[in-house]
Image: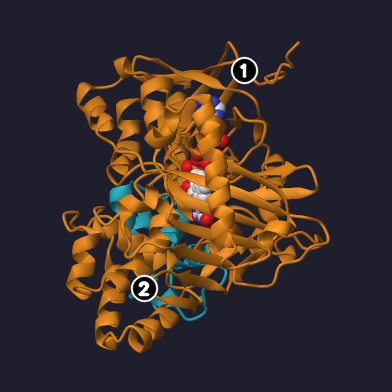
Amino acid sequence: MGDQRIKNIILEIIAIVAPDAEITDVKTDIRLRDQLDLDSMDFLDIVMELRKRYKIEIPKEEYPELATLDSCAAYLGPKLAGVAAT
Amino acid sequence: MVADRLRDIKSHYDVVIIGSGLAGLTAANCLAKCGRSVLLLEQHYNFGGMATWFHRKGGHIFDISLHGFPIGMIKSCRKYWTKEISDSIVQLKGIRFDNPQFQLQTTFDRQDFTRILVEEFGIESETVEAFFDAARGMDFYDDQSMTTRELFEKFFPGRSDVVRMLMEPIAYANGSTLDDPAISYGIVFSNFMSKGVYIFRGGTDKLIYMMRQELKANGVDVRKQVLVDRVVVEDGTVRGVMANDKFISCGAVLSNANLKTTIDKLVGHDQLSPEFVAQAKAVRLNNSSCQVFIGIREGETLDHIGDLLFTSVDPEFDSVRLCAKDVTSRTFSMYYPDTRPGSNRYAVVSSTNANWDDWAHLSEDDYQTEKKHLIETTIAALEKYIPDVRKKIDHVEAATPRTFYHYTHQAMGATFGTKFEGLQVSMDLPKQIHGLFHAGSVGIIMSGWLGAINYGVIVANEVDSLCHEDGKSEGRMAS
Ligand SMILES: Cc1cc2nc3c(=O)[nH]c(=O)nc-3n(C[C@H](O)[C@H](O)[C@H](O)COP(=O)(O)OP(=O)(O)OC[C@H]3O[C@@H](n4cnc5c(N)ncnc54)[C@H](O)[C@@H]3O)c2cc1C
């Protein structure tokens, strides 16, 4: 799955877990929580949603890897390698 | 013959949840939405745990723990429950304080507190800002050695009036004292006192009804009047639970029962390491409560005197006095007809913090006498705000620490779970026994309606993760 696709997936999930977040203009290299008013519960929801959709597990110690869209793509890339880009 | 509350249960569930407090209910809903098969067992005839209500002759309905919660409930209910539930949450704007040090009314948000502290208490606005920022910046991983008392002393030295305004509501909200860690205060304060006080319009009965509908829609198997006797553990792994003399097999158990009860009774010390047992033993419980429920006769009305009244005749805030049996501090929660739209009824609930030991060992006669005394002094205190209330009262009764113990099985009637150290023990339980989890009021910061709901979600995530991993290894074994 390509980087852009992963970033779009993360944004899609954010739109579900935080419907008030303004996701049209998110910078890929700035921390999501600094741009979008996300709290730690929202990040937990993202982790749960990724597990549900793609059966991937993100250990607690690695939650910080989800800080920015760029870091999400880098971190999730290998984990999502086998998953079809649907 | 007793009805078989476990009729037609499945031979195996991914998860059994013990207890339907807000943490148990919310975890059940999350796990079901993650695709897990979930059985929820509740010993009482109502769901909701301490989020509960009762009816009395004369058309009275009383809410036990619907006095106020933080704004975060709106978001959590929308995410983990439904938009309809979240849309029923409304702000209470009339929060009053009345004590020998000050009388004031506030909307209970950062802006209004700042105004009061600056204009009425004469504190420099920079100090107020610095205090708010310090409280806001605190988190669970910070140093725990500073106490709440020291935090106040640092920002407002010698100002017992400021301490009272900032502390009294929190002490009622979670039983914490000036000796609890400053970080537990900071975390709760910035959640609870920064954007107002909210309640659920429609009453606790409606909320729990809506939650049950949602659980049903998501396929959770819910059973009431089923007391779980114990969690069955073999070789350090959860196998199921025993309830009503039946064994129910499952891959994971999430206990929403009191943390200490879970460890001492449901699991048993022989399944746990001695270090962990010692750590669990050292966990202190928060205090319990007393309440007086006052139902106003149909047709009578009350003037709007505010929504939540923090009253006290004590000269200063004092954590010990706040729990004393001879009560000097009370919160009055006013329930006007708009609490339950369509109703024309008024009720007042007085809540005080209380000690288990003051009530637990009374003889039946003394217990009844003490309850009468509590009721009488409460009505007398209320007359200060509603002079003619006595003649409008149609029903009145009291609840004590014994009552809370009876209905929720919370150890020592604890109304706010455990002190701070309980959170670590709760979080470490899964490391002791594979497949065993705890979620429910612990650690001060995870108590209250919002704390319980959010902690339910946090633990549901752990449970789901375990189901995921166990599912993978089963898959490997099969192939
Ligand atoms: C008087 C009072 C006033 C309060 N006011 C407020 C307020 O205004 N705002 C606020 O946010 N919070 C308030 N709270 C606190 C809040 O209600 C609680 O923190 C919260 O509801 C606790 O939820 P919980 O999930 O931890 O567990 P609980 O509500 O304690 O639920 C545990 C459940 O487990 C069940 N159970 C236990 N053992 C077993 C077993 N072996 N088998 C089957 N079932 C079992 C119990 O019956 C119970 O239903 C108040 C509490 C009290 C008592």
The image shows residue B125 at horizontal and vertical percentages of: 29, 87
Which residue is pictured at 28% across the width and 55% down the height? Answer: B140
Q: Which chain is cyan?
A: A
Q: Earlier in the sequence, mark 1 or mark 2?
A: 1
Q: Colour of chain B?
A: orange
Q: Quadrant location of the N terminus of chain A?
A: bottom left
Label 1 environment density (alpha carbons within 10 Å; few <14, some 14–19, many ≥20) = few
Quadrant location of residue B361? top left
The disc placed on residue B11 is: 1
**Residue A26, relative to residue B138: is it above or below?**
below
Q: Nearer the viewer, residue B346 or B441?
A: B346
Up/down of B261 relative to B156, above or below: above
The residue depicted at 28 percent of the width and 84 percent of the height is B123
Left or right: residue B461 versus residue B341 is left
Which is closer to the viewer, label 1 or label 2? Answer: 2
- State the image coordinates of residue B475 (x, y, percent, origin top left): 47, 26
Q: For this rendering, which residue is in front, B459 or B311? A: B311
Label 1 chain ID: B
